[in-house]
Amino acid sequence: MELAIINTSGSATGKKVNLNDAIYGIEPNDHAIYLDVKQFLANQRQGTHSSLEKSTISGSTKKLHRQKGTGGSRKGSIKSGTFVGGARIHGPHPRDYSFKLNKKLKQLARKSALAYKAKDNSITILENFNMDEPKTKNYIDMMNNLKFSNEKTLLVISDYNDNIYKSSRNLAKAKVMTAKDLNTYAILNASKLILTEGSVEVIEEILNSEK
């Protein structure tokens, strides 16, 4: 798959890049995508939720009334979950939601997500660039030049650049990520995927790795 490379002004540079069919031209695997996204979202959960159960709540343990002869039901501790202000029955406790996936499955999921973007013509190749200072206005101007001002974009750069990152972080619809941190959820969550020249090579190196 061959795409033209444009600059930050939105103009064609006259250069082109070939996207590897082994990544961008595969038949997407929806189940691999599902598992990878599920793992990503699960890993975002802190799992610090906790509730008080009968053994941990404070309160009297005195039996409310005698077992028989009252005509009412049997009642034990006031801490019972059946009473207002009582303990939580089978409430949540701290836990780890993360789970493991094989590296090859995660690679397949990312390839599948990139293949979907390629099929939808939602990939733009941007010439390598730099920002002299962190300035949101400059990033907005660049998105306007690319005609992505109203799109949810993901810009993938080859290496971390503090100025580019800080220029975009206050924009709700813009996200910047390095190629090595690229994940399936981020790809699918963006309507437009912008890859710099350098990031294309890094992505290919990572996703075609056999290790």
Image (tube, rainbow, N blue to C red):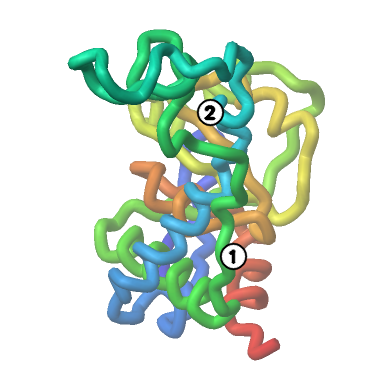
Give 188 or 151, whichever is nearer the viewer: 188
Circle 2: residue type: Lys
**Residue 100 figure quarter:** bottom right
Give 86 or 93, whichever is nearer the viewer: 86
- Give percent across and percent down for residue 35: 41, 66
Secondary structure beneath dot 2 equals loop
Secondary structure beneath dot 1 equals helix
Which residue extends farthest bottom?
210
- Give percent across and percent down for residue 57: 59, 20
Q: Residue at x 26, y 18 (%)?
A: 69
Q: Is residue 137 something that shows in the picture?
A: no
Circle 1: residue type: Val
- Give percent across and percent down for residue 54: 53, 28
Q: Which residue is mark 1?
A: 200
Could you give the CA–CA distance between mark 2 and mark 1, rounded to whole angstroms? 57 Å
Q: Which residue is mark 2?
A: 54
Counting other residues with Cα less than 10 Å from the Cα at mark 1, is it few (<14), some (14-19), or many (20 or more)? some
Q: Dots 2 and 1: beta carbons under 8 Å?
A: no
